[in-house]
Image (spheres, helix red, strand yellow):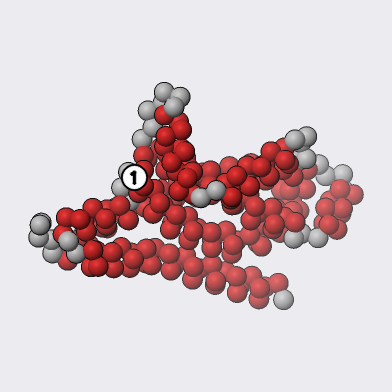
Amino acid sequence: MVEFSLWDIVRNLLLAVRWTVVLSVIAFIGGGVLGMLLLVLRLAKVPGAQRGVALFVQIFQGTPLLMQLFLAYFGIALFGVDTSAWTAAALALTLHASAYLTEIWRGCVNAIPKGQWEASSSLAMNLKEQLLHIILPQAGRIAIAPTVGFMVQVVKGTALASVIGFIELTKAGSMIANATFKPFLVFSCVGLMYFCLCYPISAWSRRLERKLNHANR
């Protein structure tokens, strides 16, 4: 058994936290960009696009993230592409986040009264102008709180990436627990670090929600 002090455990976990944060940022930014493209594609009413986007959303919302990680890791390899755990985790989490963000933002756009669409149409605006000048600025204010809240789910979702060998906070905790035979201490530290990552985001989401509700009264 390797003797680890509490500081050794915390230091090694902190080193792993950076990969949890980096993977979360990649998944959220990548998912946000793809989610916005899918939303616009759906709103543009391109033939077949609505059903295609809806099917994409249903697939990623209707299957476990764990399975999506396995498919990304082993599925790409079937085409002869050498896939690292990093690439598979980033790809799976990005697609997963994009599906949820598309649906969150679609709900926010649908919350905008139809009169806003009709008023902008009467001004001879095309879809791009309607979205940029009328719809998205209003929907964006509604979407802030649920979008920030979803960031918490993304951070916690990175823990599943350990099943394909990606060394993030949970995986590092498991490795340290096996080496020290102190699983309670190690995973208590892991849980505390997840809390320190997620609580500020949750608190920010609640604060934004209260602020926006107050502003809309």
Q: Is residue 117 above or below residue 90?
A: below
Residue 182 locus on image (x, y percent) = 19, 64
Q: Is residue 35 above or below residue 185?
A: above
Task: Inspect this view and state whether residue 21 appears.
Answer: no
| Residue sitting at x 60%, y 70% | 209
| Residue sitting at x 64%, y 70% | 212
* Kind of residue at disc 1: Phe
Q: In this figure, which residue is indicated by the disc labeled 1?
A: 166
Taking the image as shown, residue 48 lies to the left or right of residue 14, namely right
Q: Residue furthest top?
A: 80
Q: Quadrant of the N terminus?
A: bottom left
Q: Residues within 10 Å of mark 1 (few under 14, many from 20)?
A: many
Residue 34 locus on image (x, y percent) = 58, 42
| Residue sitting at x 13%, y 61% | 4
Q: Is residue 186 above or below residue 101?
A: below
Taking the image as shown, residue 90 lies to the left or right of residue 186, namely right
Along the line of sight, the residue nearer the viewer: 202 or 63: 63
Residue 140 locus on image (x, y percent) = 65, 57
Along the line of sight, the residue nearer the viewer: 19 or 136: 19
Along the line of sight, the residue nearer the viewer: 57 or 16: 57
